[in-house]
Every structure is written in structure tokens, then in C-alpha cells.
Amino acid sequence: MNGHRIIVSLVLCLFGLCLVFAMGAPRGRTAKKGKKDSRVYLIHSDELKYDQWGQVRGAQIVKGSVHFSNDGAHLWCDSAYFFQEQNSVEAFGHVRFKQGDTLSLTCDYGQYDGQAQMMRARHNVVLKHRQQTLYTDSLDYDRIYENAYFFEGGKLVDGDDVLVSDWGEYNTQTREAAFFYNVRMRSKNDVVDTDTLFYDTRESVAHVTGPSKITSGDNVINTSDAWLNSKTDRSQLFGRSTIVNKEKSITGDSLYHDSKTGQNDGYGNVIYTDTLNKNALYGDRVSYNEQTGYGFATQRALLKDYSQQDTLYVHADTLKLFTYNIDTDSVYRVVHGYPHVKAYRPDVQAVCDSMVFCSLDSCLTLYRDPVAWSGERQILGEQMKIYMNDSTVRQAQVIEQALSVEKVDDDNHYNQVSSRLMDAFFVDGAVRRVVATGNVKTIFYPQDSKDSSLTGLNYLETDTLRMFMTPQRQLERIWTSRASGTMYPITQIPPQKYRLEEFAWFEELRPTGPDDVFLWRGKGGDNKLKAVRRQEAPLQHIGSGGAGEDRP
């Protein structure tokens, strides 16, 4: 019996020695050139056991400072099951995996498949690659494709950028990561919430797809397709995105945002809105700077000002917006528009070549051949200023070649006033007083007080004229300085007296609604105002031959 035991012990010792030599490092072995050795080798362990019929069949049980290697990668742990035939390892306790000088991984439990070159790490997993660190609870690292997959929630730290999600992947070759479901990215200045995010660690550039919210300082960005650079603080937004900054917002098919400079550039049906100052700027190309308050719009540019009771619509080929005293209680805006300006509000309409609107005094100044309408009255001149109050037009001032024409009836009878300077004062949208000065000429049709029928034509020439109107826009009284004129009965008006020499009526140019401001209908060449040359100062000619000699 004792002899039998001795023989069995000798057999087991010989078998164990064979296993140790078989599992030892392949020192002195050289693989064939061009072929990779995919076998897993046990480098060291304090203890080794093998029980073919034990609880873990086919496994060699190794304990104490365990060290494996496979094709340039190394695995350390406290204990492990080594399945030599399957070329795999199941590691326990303080598991550490390292590949080259740039990648290391730690976890509590791991499985390594040498044939597939797949490392499966579980519990308190930390993957470090260059300057990036990935924290998760479950991670699979594919050495062949150099992809790390996590699926029980993960966090990637890249300098100031921190990204978390339910699951995702990271490629150690391209250094690009993808995050899915409940994704949140925190950088130095931004917080991104989305369901899909792709991140390039080399450039610190994130690409979000699907409904996403980005918080950047005072800005809140809603987008479905955006590129964010945390190094430069620049964003490229596509897919009809919106940037909201307190009371201001900009929406467009494509937006470019710089958090450092506050610059925003939009393309494709762009809408800039300022709810505090109650105005909006539209265009297919719009630019606005949050810090300076400067902006411009072109390509179907439109300004909407709804700070008054009725909304004012102003269109021009180009609109520029200037902000003064920005971020103070005394902030105000100035808008420049040129050329082909058209403005519409229910109580006032205008066309001109260029204009300036100032919110400080609610003044709209029209330049180069302007024409404006209010009710049945048309005014025109070389330059025009229209002042507005909270509900309607307050005053209109026409400078040089001023002409006011009011349609009296459908039989083409018009009240007319021409002068060098004209001021019209409005009450509740109706002209109540007109003051004309300088070479004043007028034609008025007095009306019968009973049936409002026309009784005649009153032609008047004077230097200063004041007219007072009723709320129904009827002439109430006239005050003039020295005047000369003629009164014609309605049946005895000479044909040449129906119109002033300066008379012009441009009803066909009048904007009919908000959409009509985009349709330009310019005056004909014969109907434009005459260019008036300013008086020039006399030239002094100093002769070359003497003090009093003129040059020829």
C-alpha cells in the first residue's frame, strides 16, 4: 500500500514538473518571422495547483503575485484560473493590465481571451490611455481593433473635459470616443446634455447628434447637430439650432458661435430676437456680437420692431444694427438700412433708398427720394424724419422739396401743400396740425358742413402756413402770414389749377402689408425728385505774379 502511494506521488510530481515547464515563459524560443504568438504565458505565481476533476475543471489555479503575458501585453492579479487549452485567464483581485507605455487598466475582476485578444474587466474599472482616463464598472477591451466598450455607465476625463453616459466606446488608436444615452459633457465653460456624442480627444472636439442642450456661460443652445471645440470655445451648429442669451436669441439653419468673443454668425432663414427691446432681425445671413451689440442682416433682411402697439416691418437689401450703452438701463439701438428700403406699419408706410431708425427717440429717418403714407395722405421730400410714440406716429418732418398730398374723394381731388420744410403732427394716427415754411403753395378743397360736398378750390401762396385738422382729417382752420391766393367755385376751376407744379401721387409704390416690403417697385426716372445743387462758396484765385493777380 505504501509502495503504491509512493508511485502515485512520483507520477504527480513528474506531471507537475511537465506542466511548469510547459507553462513557463518561452525563453530561447523564436517565433517564425511574420507570425504572432497568441499564446498566454504564465510568467510568475507564488502557488500553482491543478485539479483535473476539481470545481473548475481544466483550470490551473495560481495565487500570489500572478503575472501573465500575451503578445506584448501583461496581466497582473492576486489569483487566477489559467485555462491553458482555451488560452484564457480568469483573474481576481487587484487586476492590472498593461499594453505598451500608453495604456493601462485596473479592475477587481477580469477575463482575458488570448485567442481573441479580448480583455473583459469588471468592477471599479479604470482605463488610462495617454492623458485620457476612463472610469466604468464594466468594460471590454478589444486589442485587435483597439476598441474599449463600456456598458454599465462610464466617465471619460480628458483634461478639463469630463464626459459621462450609459454606454459607449473609446478607440485607443484614433483616440476617438462615442457616448450613447444620458450623455453629459462638462468642459471649462460648457455643459452638454444629449443622447449621442462623438468626441475626438486629440482635438478636444465633440460632435453631438439628436436633440441636445448646451449651456455655455449665459448661453443656452438647443441643437440636433453640433460641433464643439473646448479648446477654442467655438461651436458649429446645424439642423435649425437656437442660441439663447438671456433676453436675446438667434436661430438658423447653420450657426457659428464663439464664446470668447460673443460672435454669432447664422446662415439660412436666420432669426435674431431681442425680447427686452422688443425687436427681431431676419435674413438668410445674419451676424450678431453679444458683447458689442453689433449685427447685420442681408439676403431677405427684415427688421421687426414690436415695441409699439403695432409692429413695424422694415426691409432693405442690407440691415445693420448698432447697440449703445449695452447691458445698462440706458441701452438703445440704431438700425441702418440700404438700399431699397420699404417699411410697413398699419398706420404708416414708407419707401426710400436708405434709412436710419433710432430706438432712443423712436425716430425713423428716410434718405434719398423718400415717400411716406398715413391714411389718405402722402408726403415726400429730399429727407424725412418720422417720430413715433407708444402707439402710433407722433410727428413727421420733411426737409427740402416737401410735398403733402391728401386724397379727398374718388374723383381725383387732392389737397396739396408744397414747401421747403414741413412738419406734420399726429394724434391717434391722424394728422391734426401741419406747419409748412418756405415758398409755401397750397391747394385746398373746402367742404360743405352738411353733406361734406366740395364747394370750391382755394389756391394760396405764402411763406408760412399752419393748418389745423379735425379728427376726421377735415380742414378746420388755416393760419398764414402774408398770403396771396384765389378761390375758385367748384364748377369754375381751370383745368391747369387742379394740380400744383410739384404734384406727384405714388399709390402704386405704397406697401400693402408685411410681406409686400420684399417687393421693390421703384419710381420711374421721370418721377424722381430733382437734384438740387447746393450753393457753392465763391473761389478765390491767387495769381502767381503778385498779390492781387488772379489765375486765368
Image (cartoon, grey):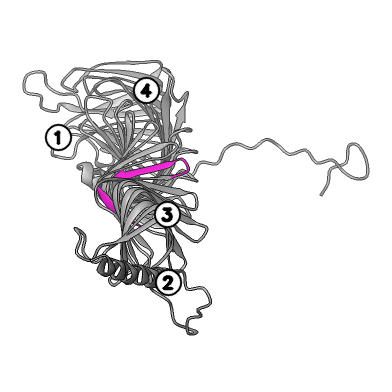
Dot 4 corresponds to which residue? 484
Up-down relation of residue 32 to residue 316 (above or below): below
User: SS of the residue at dot 3?
Assistant: loop
Q: Answer whether residue 317 is visible to the viewer in this image.
A: no
Residue density around tag 3, few if under 14, some if 14–19, many if 20 or more, within 10 Å: few
Q: Residue at x 36, y 29 (%)?
A: 441
Disc 1 from disc 4: Cα separation:
26 Å
**Closer to the eye: label 1 or 4:** 1
- Identify which residue is drawn at 20% across, 43% down: 512
Circles 1 and 3 in contact, beta carbons < 8 Å:
no
Specify start and end residues of the magenta stretch as a single range.
158-170
Q: Nearer the viewer, residue 485 or 158?
A: 158
Q: Position of residue 374 (x, y in %)?
A: 24, 31
Q: Which residue is mark 3?
A: 46
Q: Residue 169's spot in the image, x, y percent? A: 32, 56
Q: Give the residue number, with chain letter if any, for mark 1.
A: 409
What amino acid is found at the position of numbered circle 4 in the picture? Ser
